[in-house]
Image (cartoon, grey):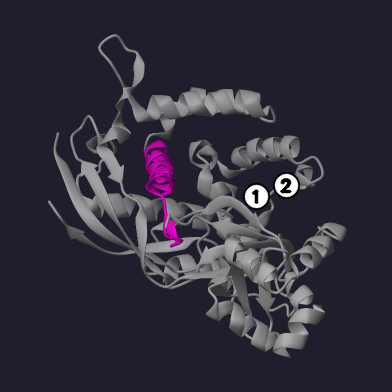
């Protein structure tokens, strides 16, 4: 075993979303449209504030009478006791901040003055600080490494591809074939020819959690761009995401033995970074032709972001998560398989019409009045530790 470690800087070129599974409704945050910020509340502090002013029952009744459309900003704007005591919403918000009721305030990057709706939350640590789990990073690295290996050795996986074509449109059957393929690619056989996770090449890759060094969170709306159009379609989906320009640091460990990462040609950080770049550029080539008329600048970000190394996190689209396009002998066959899968998963998604690419929408995010590819990152530098 020959393990080497680097401290790596991860820079978010565009917003990055790693979901916590938590969702915030309008009854759980205040959107300050003057400051264009979303104010998240400390629940205990909020209850204490309501009780202090004798309006807890009034708040509960208002919320329960209209739980779906209840708007916290509208409530404090119209609540008679609060307006009588503080005079203005601005004064109420100031008091909430002074009393520690507001946990954090994050800029809203969309252009709609109405603000966001339900918000999908970002992963936070026990101190309420955003971070990217090492498991999320390693999952993205794993996909890139496997895709690169398959592209370099596609002829050895023809039978696997035929099995995938046969099961196309059958979610569970296709899933089993893909799982078997990944095991074959990622795990070395033992002396008896059996595959056991103990012998996974990826035991030679360790990735720590990525901690935030600079930057912070913002609220961004999801947008979709369809084929042959220059107009995006804003979806009623909002995410808490790391702002573009945010910097994180994590520790990367690589065992360069042939029984570990050396099997994939990774003997140092440069090899690792080149493989990540190859996978991002592979995605660029897939997306470029069908979407270049409507998203030339957004796609060009891949080339401009200091040779983008990674498309990371949620909302980045199917291609960033799959090995299907790498495994397929050509684009047409890949589109056929993915079209069948998407049609079975989303019966009302019009995927039966997918011909140039599947899925047929480019996943974007709106920030600062512009559209970006979601989750575009580069490795800003690496310091060898040992």
The residue to which callout 1 is attached is 357
The structure residue drawn at horizontal position 68% and vertical position 27%, both measured from the top left corner, is: 170
Q: Secondary structure at mark 2?
A: loop
The residue to which callout 2 is attached is 354
Residue 303 placement (x, y as % from top left): 44, 67
Extreme bottom residue here?
87
Extreme top residue here?
192
The structure residue drawn at horizontal position 56% and vertical position 23%, both measured from the top left corner, is: 176
Q: Is residue 76 left or right of residue 325?
A: right
Question: Which secondary structure type mostly characterizes the magenta part of the structure?
Answer: helix
Question: How would you rate the neighbour count of disc 1 (Cα within 10 Å): few for under 14, some for 14-19, many for 20 or more?
Answer: many
Is residue 34 depicted above or below 284 in this figure? below
Q: Nearer the viewer, residue 327 or 55?
A: 55
Separation of residues labelled 2 and 1 (CA atoms): 6 Å
Magenta-colored stretch includes residue 149: yes
Q: Is residue 275 left or right of residue 313?
A: left
Q: Is residue 162 visible?
A: no
Tell me the magenta residue range: 127-151
Q: Secondary structure at mark 1?
A: loop
Magenta-colored stretch includes residue 272: no
């Amino acid at each position: 075993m020959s393990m080497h470690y680097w401290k790596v800087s991860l820079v978010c070129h565009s917003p990055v979303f790693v979901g916590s599974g938590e969702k915030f409704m309008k009854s759980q945050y205040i959107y300050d449209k003057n400051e264009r910020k979303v104010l998240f509340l400390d629940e205990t502090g909020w209850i204490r504030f309501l009780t202090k002013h004798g309006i807890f029952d009034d708040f509960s009744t208002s919320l329960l009478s209209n739980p779906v459309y209840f708007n916290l900003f509208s409530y404090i704007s119209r609540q008679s006791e609060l307006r009588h005591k503080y005079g203005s919403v601005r004064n109420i918000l100031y008091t909430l901040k002074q009393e520690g009721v507001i946990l954090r305030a994050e800029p809203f990057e969309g252009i709609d003055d109405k603000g966001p709706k339900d918000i999908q939350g970002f992963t936070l640590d026990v101190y309420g600080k955003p971070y990217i789990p090492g498991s999320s990073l390693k999952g993205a690295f794993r996909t890139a490494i496997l895709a690169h290996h398959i592209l370099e050795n596609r002829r050895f996986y023809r039978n696997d591809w035929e099995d995938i074509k046969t099961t196309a449109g059958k979610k569970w059957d296709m899933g089993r074939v893909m799982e078997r393929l990944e095991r074959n690619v990622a795990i070395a056989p033992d002396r008896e020819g059996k595959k056991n996770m103990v012998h996974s090449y990826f035991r030679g890759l360790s990735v720590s959690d990525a901690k935030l060094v600079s930057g912070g969170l913002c609220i961004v709306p999801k947008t979709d761009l369809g084929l042959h159009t220059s107009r995006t379609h804003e979806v009623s989906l909002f995410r808490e995401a790391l702002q573009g320009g945010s910097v994180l640091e994590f520790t990367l460990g690589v065992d360069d033995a042939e029984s570990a990462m050396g099997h994939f040609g990774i003997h140092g950080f440069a090899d690792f970074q080149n493989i990540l770049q190859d996978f991002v550029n592979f995605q660029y080539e897939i997306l470029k032709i069908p979407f270049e008329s409507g998203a030339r600048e957004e796609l060009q970000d891949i080339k401009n972001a200091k040779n983008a190394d990674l498309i990371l996190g949620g909302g980045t689209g199917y291609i960033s998560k799959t090995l299907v396009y790498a495994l397929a002998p050509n684009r047409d066959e890949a589109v056929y398989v993915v079209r069948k899968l998407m049609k079975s998963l989303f019966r009302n998604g019009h995927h039966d019409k997918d011909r140039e690419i599947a899925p047929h929408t480019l996943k974007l995010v709106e920030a600062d009045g512009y559209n970006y590819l979601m989750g575009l990152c580069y490795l800003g530098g690496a310091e060898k530790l040992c």
